[in-house]
Amino acid sequence: MHIYVPNMYKQDIFKINYKKLKQKGIKYLIFDLDNTIALIDERKTPKKTKTLFDQLKKDFTVLIISNNTKKRVQEYSDQLEVDFISMAMKPFPKGFIQIKRKYKCEKKEMCMIGDQLMTDILSGNAYHIFTILVDPLGKKDLKITAINRWMERKVLVRLKKKNLFEKGSYYD
Ligand SMILES: [Mg+2]
């Protein structure tokens, strides 16, 4: 069950302790898109998000990795002026392998940030990189996410029973 436990858990991307990540030697912040950075039907980047990303880019290489289509991911990534990987097939490590090759980085420098245990956290933990879970931005999910959320609810019950993880108990 430890494969589902994130290294850090925060309400949203604005609450993450990025200073701590930098001190840990993290150099690559890899964000999920839908319900992590943006609402699923949001096409224009809010100013607040743009400001955060501009700030982060001073200290990190920032990327977006999403299972969504190229059209969707590119439109959003272009506004934030960051590199992206679409159709990433998380929880498979395809996207991480591509990033590692392209940027010649080490696993210990990579950090995955996302709102789903079954894709973002599972993929990051299985690939042995630092993982951060955030609560989903909106209540609405993509249709394809329904099955993952159903599995996630079952996993959350087991994690809580084993005292490994509990929703709403945030930590660094
Ligand atoms: Mg997501």
Image (cartoon, grey):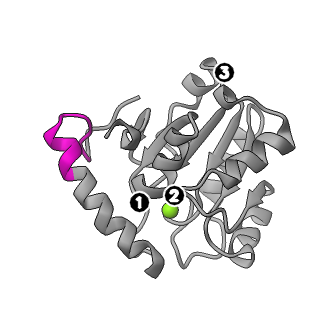
Q: Position of residue 149 (x, y in %)?
A: 34, 66
Q: Closer to us: mark 1 or mark 3?
A: 3
The part of the image, by quadrant, that contains residue 165 is top left
Q: Position of residue 169 (x, y in %)?
A: 26, 39
Rounded to the nearest whole Å, what is the CA distance between mark 1 and mark 2? 6 Å
Determine whether 1 is above or below 77 in the image.
above
- Queried on whether the Cβ of the residue with tag 3 lies below 8 angstroms from ligand 1, the answer reads no
Task: Kindly identify the residue that appears in the image at 29 percent across and 68 percent down.
Answer: 150
Which amino acid type is marked by label 3? Gly
Residue lying farthest to the left in this orientation: 161
Q: Are marks 1 and 2 in contact (CB under 8 Å)?
A: yes
Disc 1 element: loop
Determine whether 46 is above or below 120 in the image.
below
Q: Is residue 57 magenta?
A: no
Query: How many other residues sit within 10 Å of disc 1, few (<14), some (14-19) or many (≥20)?
Result: some
Q: Is residue 129 left or right of residue 7?
A: right
Rounded to the nearest whole Å, what is the CA distance between mark 3 and mark 2? 23 Å
Magenta span of residues: 157-167
Q: Position of residue 70 (x, y in %)?
A: 74, 74
* Mark 3 / mark 2, whichever is N-terminal: 3
Query: How many other residues sit within 10 Å of disc 2, few (<14), some (14-19) or many (≥20)?
Result: many
Q: Quadrant of the N terminus?
A: top left
Is residue 142 at least partly visible in the picture?
no
Circle 1 sits on which residue?
136
* Mark 1 / mark 3, whichever is N-terminal: 3
Circle 3 sits on which residue?
25
Q: Position of residue 118 (x, y in %)?
A: 42, 56
